[in-house]
Image (cartoon, rainbow, N blue to C red):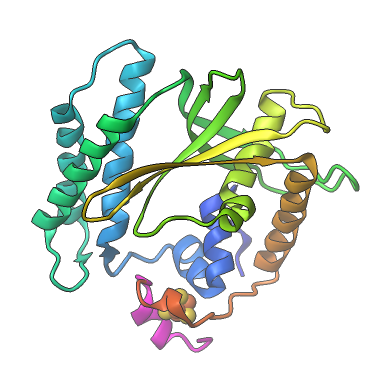
Amino acid sequence: MNYENIPDHISFSQVNTYLICPLRYRFQYIDKEEWQFKPAALTLGSAIHAAIEKYYTNHLESKRTSITDLQDVFDTRLYQDCAEVEMKFKTGKDPVEIQQQGHAMLDCFMKNVTPGEVLGVEEKFTLDVVDGATGETLDVPLVGRVDLIEQTEDGNIVFVDYKTSSSRYNEDSVQRNLQLTAYSLWAREAYSTGKKETVHLRFDVLLKNKTPLYLKYETQRTYQDAQRFVRMLLMISEAIREELFYPSPGWQCVDCPFKVSCVADPLA
Ligand code: SF4
């Protein structure tokens, strides 16, 4: 493999894609293939994300936000996505229904949001990753973006990621979630968190129910959790350099935008 094709950074999305299916990782990040379609759920999620980002940015700047402001941001993103790439809708769904669903979810958000003191919105980071036990360093930086950083009434600084979901999260999946662990790795550095202290994290989830719900899932990560993630990053990085891009068929194939390439690939 030409090493120039390997991304010059690693992100949680890359890690997650590699863990779900290494061949999909190759199509997406090494070969940079065009997506054959985009699942509508992904577009709904990113349009909701853009609207919530607008809310918190306004909040940080002491500006008021109306539901119409959020719906405008949502609609722009939704129809931009629909124009750029073919959308894959669940049976019986179309853009108008996605729009109605999104508006109902934003309405639920506006009725239930109770922001703490907002310290940061869409905070980008680039981090050199080092194994604290061996000193081994990852050859590329970890990059990411924390959706929201806020200080809660009890004085804790909390690192938040917004999600949309069709079902409630269970405690175990929140406790093990690697995206939040990646956030915690950066947060430790950025906020000089001692090894004995935990990092506070949260998922703010809008449920895509008929009557939407807004749920908050709080969790924490230790220094050991972050270091375990570092060792995972080192192993995944090595696997990528060793060109371990095997297919992993399963539930993940249903919405995979590289299905056609996968079937045609001699490795698959
Ligand atoms: S179709 Fe399935 S096995 Fe093939 S690349 Fe996509 S997720 Fe992997």
Q: Is residue 6 visible?
A: no
Q: Which sits in the foreground, 28 or 21?
A: 21
* Quadrant occupied by the N terminus: bottom right
Residue 56: image location, x then y, percent: 36, 24
Q: Residue at x 17, y 74 (%)?
A: 91
- Taking the magenta stretch, the answer to whether it contains residue 220 is no
Report which quarter residue 16 is drawn in: bottom right
Q: Is residue 108 left or right of residue 150?
A: left
Q: Is residue 111 left or right of residue 3?
A: left
Residue 169: image location, x then y, percent: 48, 55
Residue at the extreme top of the image, as rendered: 62
Q: Quadrant of ligand 1?
A: bottom left
Residue 144: image location, x then y, percent: 54, 40
Magenta part of the chain: 256-268
Q: Residue at x 53, y 21 (%)?
A: 152
How many numbered tags mark residues here? 0
Q: Is residue 67 left or right of residue 126?
A: left
